[in-house]
Image: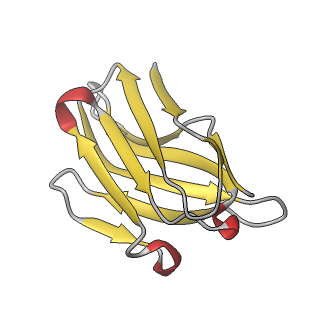
Amino acid sequence: QVQVVESGGGLVQPGGSLRLSCIVSGSIYSINAMGWYRQAPGKERELVAIITSTGTTNYADSVKGRFAISRDNAKNTVYLQMNSLKPEDTARYFCNAEIKRWSNTVNRYWGQGTQVTVSS
């Protein structure tokens, strides 16, 4: 079994910061790309940021310069530092990890998400 668990969401004022964390655990051989997605009410889930196993990153245009993704491979953890938050960043944030199991299968796993609300 594989578990993907996010934390760090909450209510923050515009201009504030939050740091999301996502820990992956279970029967894992290796983790390839890890990413953060978000989904606002009535909207489709969208990519926020992604990081490969070697540290290459990619961001949605809407968060470039404000958000930073990083990972700690020793801890199977990915982070999302969110600065200068705007009301339009309000959404449920989901972690996704592409995981290779000891059985040699590769699948993408999702967490349950963590709510981020930006409001005064």
Residue 20 location in percent, x, y? 47, 42
Residue 33 location in percent, x, y? 32, 52
- 67 or 75: nearer the eye? 67
Residue 46 appears left or right of 76: right
- 47 or 26: nearer the eye? 47
- 114 or 94: nearer the eye? 114
Tell me how many marks there are: 0
Residue 66 appears left or right of 58: right
Asked if 23 appears above or below 41 in the picture, the reply is: above
- Give the image's coloring scheme: secondary structure
Q: Residue at x 34, y 19 (%)?
A: 27
Q: Residue at x 24, y 28 (%)?
A: 75
Q: Residue at x 25, y 56 (%)?
A: 52
Q: Quadrant of residue 46?
A: bottom right
Residue 34 location in percent, x, y? 36, 49
Residue 5 appears left or right of 9: left
Q: Residue at x 26, y 44 (%)?
A: 71
Q: Quadrant of residue 72?
A: top left
Asked if 117 appears above or below 58 in the picture, the reply is: above
State which quarter of the image contains the C terminus.
bottom right
